[in-house]
Amino acid sequence: MIYVDKTEKIYELMQLGKHNFIVRPRRFGKSLFLDTVGAICESHKEAFNGTWAYDHVDWEAEKRPVLRIDFTAIEYKACSLEQGLQDYFKGLAKKNGVELFAQSAKGMFTQHIEALSIDKPLVILIDEYEMPITDFLGEDEAKLKENTETLRSLYTTMKGLGHYIHRSFITGVSKIGKIGVFSSFNMLNDLTLDERFATLFGYTETELRHYYGDYIAEAAKKYKCTEVEILAEIKAQYNGYSWDGIEENKVYNPFSIINFFQAFKFRNFWFETGTPTMLVRGARKQYLDMAALEHIEANNDVLSSANLRDFYGVALLFQTGYLTIKKIETLSWEDIYTLGFPNQEVRAAFAKYLLAEYVEKPVDFADLTLAHKLRLHLERQELKAAFQVFAPVVASTGYDITKRTEGYFHTIMHVLMYSTGLTTFSELQSAEGRLDTICVANKAIYIFEFKLNGTAEEALVQIKNKHYATPFLEGPKTVYLIGVNFMTEGKKINEVLVEQWEVPRFVRLADDFTPIEGL
């Protein structure tokens, strides 16, 4: 086992406010964080041998009772949340030696707090606080409302029992339940965007190199490349998550890293552990395309918000890890956040789900029949076959997309290209204009320009006249200039022109000649 030592930052956090709240995406170590806090409070010093905490924590002073509530272990689908909580507290009562008299979950929670804090105020740890809400978003409104009320009643208990509580630590994947369930318990110290804890969850570059050095070397050997090269690919796939916009504080997804070093294969490990159907449908509902999601500006109010009515908005995409902070700019005393996809894993996988929504097909179809085939054709420079994948996608796009705007053709092409997992740039600003799409394969670069109800020749001429290919001509890859024309009538690609760029060669005309006088 490898334990990446975060105990110094965890202990720093433990000295802060009475009720602490932090949101991070799934599989980023929130449960392990609560385990660590609990183990410190229960004074399991020997478990920390070799970590920062072992020699720096005042173990006697920190020792106190712990009450942990884990919503992943509570049944609320086969029965009501109230019944599930009651059954959960009965199990805790047996474990902790608490005699229960109360009949309600709220009463049982109160009795636990009072009973466990006889000698010292206790520490409360709550994992996945909003799970009974997010599991019913967009599906069962009655259950959603019922669970929200149940949680509000439960958490309000903590407000009136403050003198029994030393500290509480509450974690979740989103803030979607925060306003609803904590409306009466409004004393939370929200640390989600606190710069001091930007690297508390996930692995920094330094930590990855230090703790996983042997695995990096083994991966380089397997892929027959240098460690620098394999690290660059690992970074592109799994790094990029940020909660403060500082480059050196970007972190790797720990779940994906662990799985990569077990299999030594690049896969969408994190994305495959949860289906973002609700969020993708929301993106479609808002007509957000991949290019838009690459560059979204929002202020702190937007990032901190999330509610039951707008449960698919930008805030939730950020909080759940599908978008991350790329840059923070302070304007007139207000922070403006630029958001985008954290890495290639999230970008490509999200595109596949969005593509499935657009063509109204299962995601497996979008992945294997469309994205995978398209990637193979582009890697092999089989452009005719590639456009045989493009054409039916454009024709089969749902009517609600096509009626929205003429720009839907661009949207579909962008999503298709992103879904391949190849490095893709859309609406990239150059010195002489904004080019539509660039896709970078292993041995080729594809530069696309799209026209609507025009001609492919016009598109190709624009690529040349505006010198879109210039930045890519020095490298060893073959550069293809591709003009595409769509027709609104019939929703189809009616014309494609492809030109392979030939690098001009300088020919020596003579070895010696008489210079022109004056020059």
Image (spheres, rainbow, N blue to C red):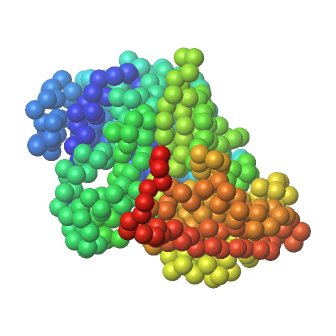
Vertical position of residue 17 compared to residue 274: above or below: above
Looking at the picture, tell me which residue is in the foreground, 470 or 173: 470
Quarter of the image where the N terminus is located = bottom left
Residue 307 visible in this rendered orientation of the protein: yes
**As drawn, is 509 to the left or to the right of 40?**
right
Residue positioned 51% across, 80% down in the render? 380
Residue positioned 77% across, 55% down in the render? 407
**As drawn, is 488 to the left or to the right of 213?**
right
Vertical position of residue 429 compared to residue 477: above or below: above
Total marks shown come to: 0
Q: Residue 11 appears in which quarter of the rendering?
A: top left
Q: Position of residue 493 (x, y in %)?
A: 77, 72
Q: Position of residue 198 (x, y in %)?
A: 37, 35
Residue positioned 36% across, 45% down in the render? 251
Residue positioned 55% across, 75% down in the render? 378
Looking at the picture, tell me which residue is in the foreground, 3 or 126: 3
Toward the right, the furthest residue is 489
**As drawn, is 183 to the left or to the right of 129?**
right
Q: Position of residue 76 (x, y in %)?
A: 55, 52
Residue 422 visible in this rendered orientation of the protein: no
Looking at the picture, tell me which residue is in the foreground, 440 or 323: 440
Vertical position of residue 62 compared to residue 131: above or below: above
Q: Residue 241 appears in which quarter of the rendering?
A: top left
Vertical position of residue 59 compared to residue 345: above or below: above
Q: Position of residue 459 (x, y in %)?
A: 73, 63
